Structure formats: C-alpha cells, structure tokens
Amino acid sequence: MSHSLFNLQPLLHLLLTACVLAVVPLSWIWLRNPRASTARRIQLLTLLTLFLTFDLVLFGAFTRLTDSGLGCPDWPGCYGFASPVGAHGEIAQAQAQMPSGPVTHTKAWIEMIHRYLAMTVGGLILTLAVFAWVRRLKGDSQTPVFWPSLTFLWVCVQGAFGALTVTMKLFPLIVSLHLMGGMTLLGLLMVQARRSALPKLSSDLRVGIALGLLLLSVQIFLGAWVSTNYAVLACDTVPLCQNALWPDMNFSQAFTLWRPLGMTGEGEVLSFQALTAMHVTHRCFAILLALYLVFLASRLWRLREQRRHAIGLLVVLLVQVLTGISNVVLGWPLLAAVMHTGGAAALCVILIGLLL
C-alpha cells in the first residue's frame, strides 16, 4: 500500500495528546509539593524530566531492538492517524501482506508509544524553558535561561532526527545520531538538574573525566553503529571472534557512513566481513574504555568524598561488560540489549555529574 512518508493531518491531535500527557507529571509535581517555592518545583520537574528522558532512551532502544522503528511507516502519526486504533485497517493489510515484516499491530503500538513518550518529554522541556524565561522577565536575574532554551532547541532537533529515522527507512547513520542526540539531551538536563554543591575536583582530574566522557561518546556511537547495522551476532564467541583473534574484516565497507541499511555506498549488499569489522572495532574500543574507566575510578577512590561515585562508576561498568558479553553468547537477548543501552546512558549521567 502506498502512503505519504510525511502526513501532518494528525499533528493537531498529537499535540493535544502531548499536552494531556505532559500535564500529568506537571500536576503531580505541583500537588505533591503544595508549599514548595516555584524554584523548588522547577528543580523537581527538571529531575522528573531527566528520569523520563532516561526512560525514553531505553524505550527507544526497545523500539529499535524489536524492529518496531517502522511500525508506523509515516510521520508523525500512523497512516495519517493519531494512534494505531484509527489505522487498524491499513496495519492489518500490511501485516497480511508480510506477517513478519516491519508493520504489525504490536510494532505499531510500540512505535507510537515511543513517539507519545518523546512528545511528553518535549512538552516538559518546553515548560521548563517557558518558566525560565517568565522568571527572568519578572526580574529574577539568577534564573538561567541559556540551558533551558538550548535544551528545548535540542529536543526539536531530536524530533527532526526521529522523523528522518522513519522517512529514511532506518538509515544507519541517522539512527545512530538519533541515539547520540538522546544522550546529549540527558547531558543537557543533567546540567540543569545538578544543584548540590560538591567539593571541587582538581583541574587534571576534571580533564581526565572529560577525556573519559569523550571516549564513552565514541564507544556509544560504535555501539549504535553495530546495533543499527545488525552486526551484534557477527561474532558469536568471547574473547575470540569466529574462533580467530583477528578474523577476516572489511573496514572500508564497515565505516562508510552515508549508505542505506544493509547496503554499501555503491549500492551492493553489505558483506559479512564489514559486519565483523564493526563488531571487532566496538569490542576493542570497549576494552580500552573499560581500562580507562577503571583507572579513573581508582583516582576518584583516593578522594573520600568521591568514593560513592567511584563505586557507582565501577558497578555500572561491570553491568556493561556483563550485558555486552551476554549479547554475544546468548544471541542478543532483548533484556540484555536494552540494559546495555541503559548502562551507557547511566555512565554518561555519572561522568557529566562529576564534571559539574
């Protein structure tokens, strides 16, 4: 069935849905804290938005890992409707033509729930930006407006990448950048949520943390690249890959960034050697990152007030190692794969929190 990739007909209904969904956490914050100051309520709302954004990153991974990214093959709605209920006939027809294809009733609901959650987060971020500007215009010079405004701008960029993910048919680079954008959004919200005063770290330790964050960012992109290209099972053993220390690989195909899913830049089918190169690169860089984070945790441990951060860093790193190994030896189980994305997000939050 032919359909338009962009169909703005349900946009008004979706915006109303986003408003209704965003009102729920807003009301919860205001009603639970009737005597709190406006500044305190905004801080609590920021923390709640950070938590929901973390959930959004996890649900985005769940959407990708269940092959639900094209569950509704148009944007922003589903076959021109605000929910899969209205698109029941179109979804049923697509599922009948290809029962195991990208469009099924379950996948459509997963995709639309992901969009509803994204719209809710967007609504909350807009609310934070509006509150910041209102307080500033009322003469409160202490209220920062730069970070809330930048966060709102970035969530709009994320929405555009979400649209491109669908309309460009899961183009690997777009999907990977969409995940990186989600991690960036977590960082921007963490900047606004962090208000407690911690002992100032030395400049060299801050540089070390910044380097760790940079290495983590590269590793997250490599992991996204492996996942979006379905290269996780190119190596099914640990520590060897295909029973070899250095299997046959094609790096030029593997890291040609601008190409459709499953194809080379020349339009040929992507080779298994390219998938192997993606996996091995991610695995090798993971070893480098793990060693560096252990070194960083050891430096934090020497500071009594930072020991809980050192423990948190090591615990999350251990979870990352275990879920990464289980993805290989257990055949990419859904729970482990989602936890692997969550662990990466948690490491981002920890390192950004330390920098602040």
Image (spheres, rainbow, N blue to C red):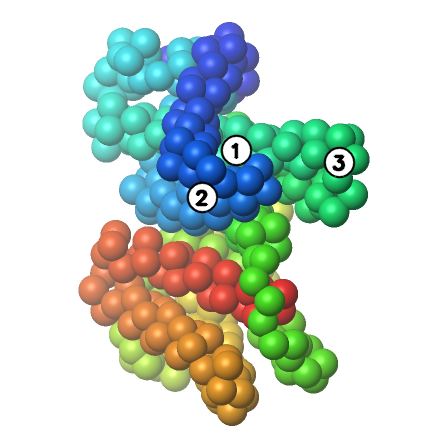
Tell me the CA gap for discs 1 and 3: 18 Å
Q: In this view, does 148 lie above or below 122?
A: below
Q: Nearer the viewer, residue 284 or 34?
A: 34
Split into 4 quadrants, where in the image is the N terminus?
top left
Residue drawn at the location 35% of the way across and 17% of the way down: 83
Type of residue at label 1? Leu
Residue of label 1: 124
Q: Is residue 208 above or below residue 107?
A: below
Residues packed near mark 2 inside 10 Å, few (<14), some (14 to 19) or many (20 plus) = some
Type of residue at label 2? Leu
Q: What element carries label 1?
A: helix
Residue of label 3: 136
Residue drawn at the location 39% of the way across and 84% of the way down: 245
Residue drawn at the location 55% of the way across and 40% of the way down: 37
Q: What element carries label 3?
A: helix
Can you name the residue that lies furthest to the bottom here? Answer: 302
Split into 4 quadrants, where in the image is the C terminus?
bottom right
Q: What x and y, as percent, mark residue 87? A: 32, 12
- Residue 270 is left or right of residue 83, and the answer is right
Of circles 1 and 3, the one toward us is 3
Of circles 2 and 3, the one toward us is 3
Tell me the CA gap for discs 1 and 2: 9 Å
Residue of label 2: 48
